[in-house]
């Protein structure tokens, strides 16, 4: 089962404190780099938990640790340059959240500064070691299970719309699960704001029985728009996270 977002981010705060303790003798004020593909508004929902994780290890922002924030607002091609900027800043640890397909390029920015990845990169699970650690978001591999759960909750639903990023890897599992259950599923792929707007407009024409979302920074930062559309169309929706800014699933 996946952890709630706040608990997960709090754990990242604790993980980020490990290399800080190791380098405590080197600097009076430690610096943590927070690199996110989202924006400051949406990260405001998760950063308090991250700070609490640091606090539990004795690090308080503004007192004995500084956090340098960098946001790309879903412009993922900017992330490698922002990572390089934090490396030049000589942060003690780099925390990466919501990076889309840019993880490999970000990790290439340094082989010495510890990197804590806030999920999304399966290479951590396949090739542990080096200067990268973190938690792999297993929900990206559970598309078939989510379709099954959706069917259990809405047994009369026959048509499902799935909103996914171009990088989504669970399409095959979802389609196979839908076939076994006798469901019709339509994928709407959106990697930009214009594609998301087009996908949401298509929902009004399709009028599916339910909507399922994959994870991703774009969807997280545009949560209000997605939730409002599902509400206006009276479409039950299964989100990838039950914490703010998302409502409870369904």
Image: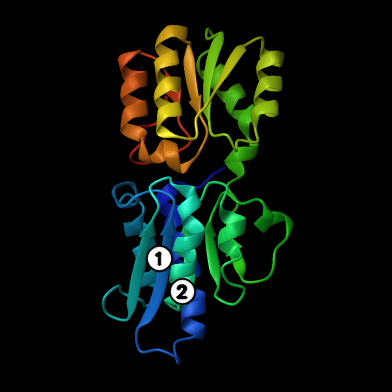
From the image, which quarter does the N terminus lie in?
Answer: top right
Q: Which residue is mark 2?
A: 17
Q: Earlier in the sequence, mark 2 or mark 1?
A: 2
Q: How would you rate the neighbour count of disc 2 (Cα within 10 Å): few for under 14, some for 14-19, many for 20 or more?
A: many
Residue 212: numbered disc: none
124 is higher (above) or lower (below) than 151 = below
Pick whichever, 245 or 171, lies toward us: 171
Out of 176 and 100, give the one closest to the viewer. Answer: 100
- Residue under the image location 45 percent in, 31 percent down: 239
Packing grade of label 1 (10 A; few <14, some 14-19, many >=20) is many
Farthest bottom residue in view: 25
In this picture the colour scheme is rainbow
Q: Secondary structure at mark 1?
A: helix
Q: Is residue 205 left or right of 112 when viewed as pictured?
A: left
Q: Which mark is residue 53?
A: 1
Q: Residue 199: image x %, image y %? A: 45, 21
For the residues labelled 2 and 1, say whether their Cβ atoms are less than 8 Å apart: yes
**Do we see residue 242 in this rendering?**
no
Kindly identify the residue that appears in the image at 35 percent across and 63 percent down: 69
Element at badge 2?
helix
Pick whichever, 249 or 224, lies toward us: 224
Instruction: Return the x and y of residue 95 as percentages of the image width and height.
Output: 47, 64
Q: Quadrant of the C terminus?
A: top left
Q: Residue at x 48, y 11 (%)?
A: 208
């Amino acid at each position: 089962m996946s952890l709630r977002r706040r608990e997960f981010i709090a754990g990242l705060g604790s993980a980020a404190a490990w290399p800080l303790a190791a380098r405590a003798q080197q600097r009076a004020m430690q610096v943590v780099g927070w690199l996110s593909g989202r924006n400051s508004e949406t990260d405001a929902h998760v950063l308090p938990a991250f700070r609490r994780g640091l606090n539990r290890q004795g690090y308080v922002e503004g007192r004995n640790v500084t956090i340098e924030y960098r946001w790309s607002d879903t412009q993922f091609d900017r992330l490698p340059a922002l990572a390089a900027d934090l490396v030049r800043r000589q942060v003690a640890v780099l925390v990466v959240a919501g990076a889309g397909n840019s993880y490999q390029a970000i990790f290439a920015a340094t082989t010495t500064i510890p990197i804590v990845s806030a999920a999304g990169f399966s290479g951590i699970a396949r090739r542990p070691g080096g200067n990268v650690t973190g938690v792999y978001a297993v929900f990206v591999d559970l598309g078939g299970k989510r379709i099954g759960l959706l069917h259990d909750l809405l047994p009369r639903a026959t048509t499902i719309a799935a909103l996914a990023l171009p990088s989504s890897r669970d399409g095959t599992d979802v389609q196979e699960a839908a076939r076994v259950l006798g469901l019709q599923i339509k994928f709407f792929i959106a990697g930009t704001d214009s594609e998301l707007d087009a996908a949401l407009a298509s929902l009004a024409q399709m009028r599916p029985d339910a909507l399922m979302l994959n994870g991703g920074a774009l969807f997280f930062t545009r949560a209000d728009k997605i939730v409002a559309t599902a509400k206006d169309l009276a479409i039950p929706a299964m989100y990838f996270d039950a914490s703010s800014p998302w409502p409870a699933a369904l």
